[in-house]
Amino acid sequence: MHSLAERVDLVRLHAAAQGLPSQRAEQILATIDTLDDGPAGWSTVWLAAGRREYDQQRYRDAVPYLNLARFPFVATPDAATAHELCVDAFGSWAASAGVRRVLLPVAGSEVPVWLAERSQAPWGNAGDVLVVCGGIVSIKEQWSRFVELGRRFGMTVVLTELPGVGEHPLAYRDSSGQDLSELFDELAAVTPVHRIFASAMSFGGTVALRAAAQDPRIERIFSVGPPMRHLFTDSDWWQQLPETTKDALAKTTGIAVDRLPGELGRFAVTPGELARITARVTAVASRRDEIVPPEDVTLLVTELRRASVFAFDDVHGSPNHMPDIALTLAGELADFAGVPVGLKHLPPLIRRARGRATAVTARTPFVDARSTA
């Protein structure tokens, strides 16, 4: 089981991704001394903070606290309570924001998603869909900011989860790419689906890439730290992975930790799949990534037809570069939606954001900062 110190380190990324001020997050973390429930317990303390917001009907503000209370997955009674309250809080906010909960039949189960129909923006087209999916520890309720962002560019927004995460009833498996494509088929019965922009983080990016190999509706993929192949096949790399990552993979796949090294190979993106992907892929890499091996970053620029990769000197998810990542994503969405360059006011900001990163290409290979320290 992972340690408190490791969870604290990993949760900072997820707090930042949800817009929770770092000072507030650190105040709460300083009061926690155990992963068990109790007065100073992880889930108990975060749950109490979330309840205060919820009781004041600040539902959207309550979500980050409640989400972190069940992070990285539900393992205690207070974590289970927090997750239920988190979904309820998001639903209360969603009702006021024109976002509805939809159940989509996939592989014999019903997968809940949050659906925000497109606005009447002066750009974008009916059937342009922004699909948002996190990795092995990120629930759909943490992505409310994408609703406003997608609508700004005239897109329908769908918030979903990696199989095995949150409310997703399926397990994360080697056919999860097919499951995601099937989800799009069912979504098309509810709202027009012609072109898909997938903003899929970490392992969500892995699944989106595998789906794109068989589904031409996926025209763009934006990801931060997507594992590709070596994480799933390199036994030496597996040994140094954070225990939280190992435990979360066991939880999402339903495979015991001690069996995972022998079974994860089939989860990797295959050479054949990479060769079939025609989607434009933009990815953010981290030079001190403790989860994604450097060889997986190299695969993005050597085996994909249309890939742009930018690397920050940071840990997994580049939590210290969230504004730069957000600007890069906004630029990709604007381009996808056909926003006139003169109107979006983004190019100078994006150039500065990317200027703080290093482009990774086949000619300028990725360098792991830990190997040069």
Image (tube, grey):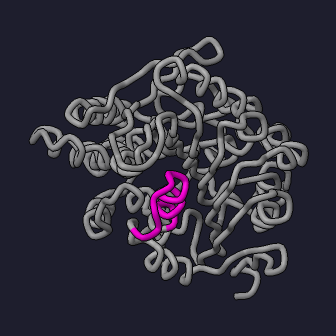
The picture places residue 274, in percent across and down from the top left corner, at 83, 49
Location of residue 52 with respect to 29 vertically, above or below: above
The picture places residue 142, in percent across and down from the top left corner, at 39, 45
Quadrant in the picture for residue 196: top right
Residues drawn in magenta: 328-342
Instruction: Please give the name of the residue rendered at 40% of the width and 31% of the height, measured from the top-left corner.
Output: 114
Give the main secondary structure, helix, strand or loop, of the magenta stretch. helix
Numbered label tally: 0
Between residue 121 and residue 157, name the one nearer to us: 121
Instruction: Please give the name of the residue rendered at 64% of the width and 31% of the height, measured from the top-left corner.
Output: 180
Residue 49 as seen in the image, left or right of residue 307: left
Residue 19 as seen in the image, left or right of residue 307: left
Q: Residue furthest top?
A: 108
Residue 326 forms part of the magenta stretch: no
Between residue 206 and residue 336, name the one nearer to us: 336
Q: Is residue 134 visible?
A: yes
